[in-house]
Image (cartoon, rainbow, N blue to C red):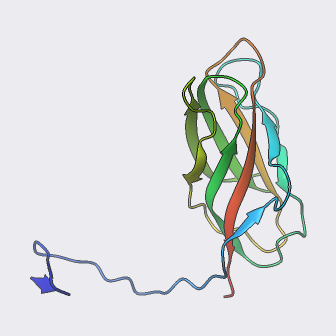
Amino acid sequence: MPLANVLYSGWHSVQNYEETNEAQEIYPTLAPGVLLTTHADDWVLGSFTEIVPVNTIDHEFHIHHVHIISPSANGEYECVLYCATTEIGRFSFSRTDKKDDVEGIEVHTDRCLANTQVQAKLASANDVSEDTVRIKIWYHEHSN
């Protein structure tokens, strides 16, 4: 079946909605990333760390990417994002001797209500110490 000069094998889907959002934003902006710390045991999430304070983003929003900055040790990491205390997404990354700045990781979280706090928890495969990493979120506000 031809559709827009592309052949499809028997079926296709049509997106019946249009996402309306503003230009991409970064938080924190023009400032260092927020420092997250793992638990001292391997694969145990550390404590909640506030990424975005309450009443900072005044429209519904969702996170598209997370910028990972300067993990403190080589190894595997996993991070959980929360709107207040409700989980909205997870992502993983690693650091090696060859590269320690992972840049942007695609996340695509659920929408958060306007003025909601964003928090995160971090875990790593290392059980020798508490590892750290700084993060910034890249998000879109929604106008509807």
Q: Nearer the viewer, residue 19 or 66?
A: 66
Q: Is residue 7 above or below residue 42?
A: below
Give the left or right position of residue 69, taking residue 17 as reference. right
Task: Tell me the residue at 56%/50% (across/down).
Answer: 105
Quadrant for the N terminus, please: bottom left
Task: Tell me the residue at 68%/30% (across/down).
Answer: 123
Q: Is residue 24 above or below residue 104?
A: below
Quadrant for the C terminus, please: bottom right
Q: Picture coordinates of residue 36 (x, y %)? A: 79, 38
Give the left or right position of residue 20, taking residue 122 as reference. left
Q: Quadrant of residue 48?
A: top right
Q: Nearer the viewer, residue 10 or 99?
A: 99
Q: Picture coordinates of residue 33 (x, y %)? A: 80, 48
Task: Tell me the residue at 73%/47% (across/down).
Answer: 135
Q: Quadrant of residue 43?
A: top right
Q: Is residue 133 above or below residue 20?
A: above
Q: Is residue 123 above or below residue 9?
A: above
Total marks drawn? Answer: 0
Q: Picture coordinates of residue 113 (x, y %)? A: 75, 72
Q: Picture coordinates of residue 111 (x, y %)? A: 65, 69
Q: Nearer the viewer, residue 73 or 140?
A: 73
Give the left or right position of residue 78, taking residue 130 as reference. left
Q: Quadrant of residue 102?
A: top right
Residue located farthest toward the front when viewing the structure as drawn: 98
